[in-house]
Image (spheres, rainbow, N blue to C red):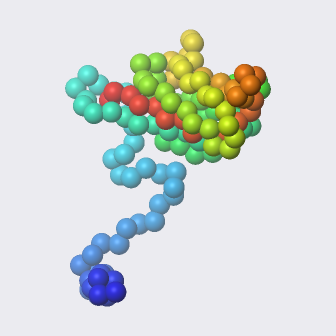
Amino acid sequence: MRLAFVLAAAAAAGSVAQAEPRSLNEPPPGGRAASTPSAGDRGMALMSATIGSNGALQRGEGAVSAARLDVGQYEIEFGRDVTACNHTATNTYQPATLLAQPRLGKPNWVYVASYHPDGFRIDSGFNLLVFCGR
């Protein structure tokens, strides 16, 4: 309670900067993945996409578009080459095994397939993370 009072008093006095509200889809300042990485960059770029079972791109960072190709098959486009990156997908709604890999012949795309535990393809929403060297 005391801390809240101190912070409120400091904010009223103008000594604490108030954060501007931002959309959940907007990264923090400086948090965007570089569209053209250079050899001198260090660290990694993290990109993400949340995809609905219908193939719609719901939100993400670095993701440009997404599409459902067929039952349980999706492709997601990112704003840079992702062929040398690591890809991981987790389902959001139902039990499914997901396969994520670079899209053959499309360097900015990731292919995701969703399988029912019995082995047949099913439509399933998922979250996709792509880890790239900067």
Residue located 54% across and 20% down the image: 101
Q: How many marks?
A: 0
Closest to the observer, 119 or 101: 119
Q: Outermost residue toward the front?
A: 118
Closest to the observer, 74 or 121: 121
Query: Height in image: 52 above or below 22?
Result: above
Closest to the observer, 122 or 129: 122
Residue 91 lies, in percent from the top left, at: 62, 38
Q: Quadrant of residue 100?
A: top right
Residue located 65% across and 24% down the image: 113
User: Does residue 69 show up?
Assistant: no
Name the quadrant of the N terminus.
bottom left
Name the quadrant of the C terminus.
top left
Query: Height in image: 124 above or below 101?
Result: below
Query: Height in image: 20 above or below 48?
Result: below
Residue 57 lies, in percent from the top left, at: 63, 40
- State left or right for residue 49 relative to residue 5: right
Residue 17 lies, in percent from the top left, at: 30, 72
Q: Quadrant of residue 97?
A: top right
Q: Outermost residue toward the top?
A: 105
Residue located 51% across and 55% down the image: 24
Residue 81 lies, in percent from the top left, at: 45, 22
User: Does residue 93 show up?
Assistant: yes
